[in-house]
Every structure is written in structure tokens, then in C-alpha cells.
Image: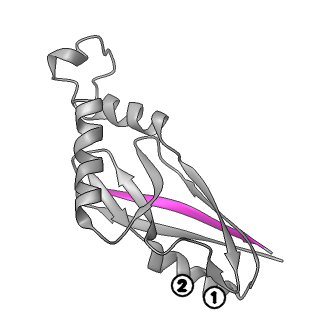
Amino acid sequence: MSSQSVVTIETHGAGLYEFTDRVMVFIRSARIESGLLTLFLRHTSCSLLIQENADPDVRRDLDAFFRRLVPQADDPAMAYLTHRAEGPDDMPAHIKAALMPVSLSIPVMDGRLALGTWQGVYLFEHRRRPHRREVVLHLGG
């Protein structure tokens, strides 16, 4: 038995967007008590993460770290980039997405995500402007 759905996440710029609650709604509606949930992101300039969901400073620090690790294309350190057609945040967003996962697998036990106490599921938007992002959910029992 399996179930599939697509979750759309509206972003309003770079940052981490938790959507654990929406994943839980899907799991409850699937009525599969035990299995493996696969999440797949249909985009090349954002990522998926399992990360702490208690202290918002963690999200801010992760965002700051990745901005420092991969600055915007108009930063002198990024002068080697040639793909600049969609603005100074485009190619850096692709680089970040290449470094981070675009799919996740999470066990489902007793009808719940087998996440740790402080873990949540996030979309990490790497672009500055708003986007509609789609995450495909597949739960196999």
C-alpha cells in the first residue's frame, strides 16, 4: 500500500520554511501506520532539510552561514560565475542546492514521523524573491 501527494510551499524570500505539520496531515490521511516517507523537491534552487525546530536562532545562523559560504554573484569572490541570467542570487542558489539534499527519507512509525524531539522538516529557499515550491510526498507501507 502507498500514498502520494504534492505539497506547495509559498516562500517570500531566502530562508527556512518549516512544513512538518503539512507532512503530518498527509501521513494521517494516508492511514499507513508503518512505512517510509520520501520527500522530493521539484526545483533546482532550494533544498530540503531536517533541522532543529525549537530555537529560531538555528535557522538564522544556517541562513547566515550559507550566505557567507556562497555569496551572491555580484560579490567579487564570485566573479568566476558565468550563469547570471536570472540575477545575482540565481547561480549561488543552484550551488547551495547542489550542496544540500533535494530529497529526504523519513521512517513512519505508529502513524507518525520518526523524527527526534527537536527535529522538523524544512524547505530551504535560496532565492531572494517569492516562489511557489512543490514537494512530492510518497509514503510506502
Check disc 2 and report the residue beneath it. 25
Check disc 1 and report the residue beneath it. 29
Instruction: Pick whichever, 127 or 96, lies toward us.
Output: 96
Rendering colour mode: one colour
Identify the image quadrant of the C terminus: bottom right
- The local crowd at label 1, few if under 14, some if 14 to 19, many if 20 or more residues have their Cα within 10 Å, is few
Tell me where residue 132 appears, x and y as whole percent.
37, 59
Tell me where residue 101 appears, x and y as whole percent.
52, 45
Above or below residue 115? Residue 46 is: above
Can residue 25 be seen from the camera position used here? yes
- Element under label 2? helix
- Which residue appears farthest toward the right when viewing the image? 1
Q: Residue 1's quadrant in the figure?
A: bottom right
Magenta stretch contains residue 47: no
Residue appearing at x 22%, y 46% in the figure? 128
Q: Residue 39's quadrant in the figure?
A: bottom right
Can residue 86 be seen from the camera position used here? no
Mark number for residue 100? none
Magenta segment:
131-140
Tag 1: residue type? Ser
Apparent side of residue 38 relative to residue 69 in the rendered image (left or right): right
Apparent side of residue 81 relative to residue 120 in the rendered image (left or right): left
Please report contact status of discs 2 and 1: CB closer than 8 Å, yes or no. yes
Residue appearing at x 40%, y 41% in the figure? 45
Tag 2: residue type? Val
- The local crowd at label 2, few if under 14, some if 14 to 19, many if 20 or more residues have their Cα within 10 Å, is few
